[in-house]
Amino acid sequence: MPSLFTRIIKGEIPCHKIMEDDRYLAFLDIRPINPGHTLVIPKKEIDYIFDVDDELLSGMIVFAKKVAGLIKKEISCKKIGVMVAGIEVPHAHIHLIPIMEISDLNFAKAKATPQDELAKVAEKIRSHLKK
């Protein structure tokens, strides 16, 4: 059975895309810790991030760096925190979370967000792709 993220890649489940290429996809988390909380995934379904081959993993970090730059341009924060937990969905992914302090990296702070709010945030972040 394909993972939730594979179903998103295939377009079976909608998402708020931030950036995409032939190997990776970045989209907003539907339960963000802070506005702009984005997931970066490889399009190849691999459960555990350290099972991702070196080339794909290194490319994923470079892709995440570009996405983090877009988020930072739009969302007021000190830094874009990076977290890899890998428990909740069996598909390797990197969380990019706008933070003001280390305590912001806490999934207990995650909250469901209405789709229209997510759409607005995604559009604002994507607008920096055009610049």
Image (tube, rainbow, N blue to C red):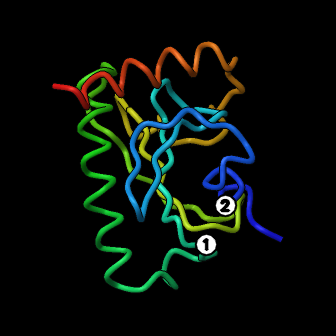
Q: Name the residue that disc number 2 marks.
A: 6
Q: Residue at x 46, y 47 (%)?
A: 26
Amino acid of disc 2: Thr
Question: Image quarter for residue 131?
Answer: top left
Q: Is residue 13 left or right of residue 72?
A: right
As drawn, the label of residue 45 is 1
* Mark 2 touches mark 1? (CB < 8 Å): yes
The amino acid marked with disc number 1 is: Glu
Position of 101 with respect to 104 (left or right) is left
How packed is label 2: few (under 14 Cα within 10 Å), some, or many (20 or more)?
many
Q: Neighbour class for label 1 at 10 Å: few (<14), some, many (≥20)?
A: some
User: Can you say whether 87 is above or below 114 in the image?
Assistant: below
Q: Check disc 2 and report its element: helix, strand or loop.
A: helix
> In the rendered view, does 13 fall on the left or right side of 16?
right
Q: Position of residue 9 (x, y in %)?
A: 60, 54
Give the residue drawn at x 25%, y 31%. 129
Q: Indicate the secondary structure of the residue bearing disc 1.
A: loop
The image shows residue 48, relative to residue 5, as above or below, that is: below
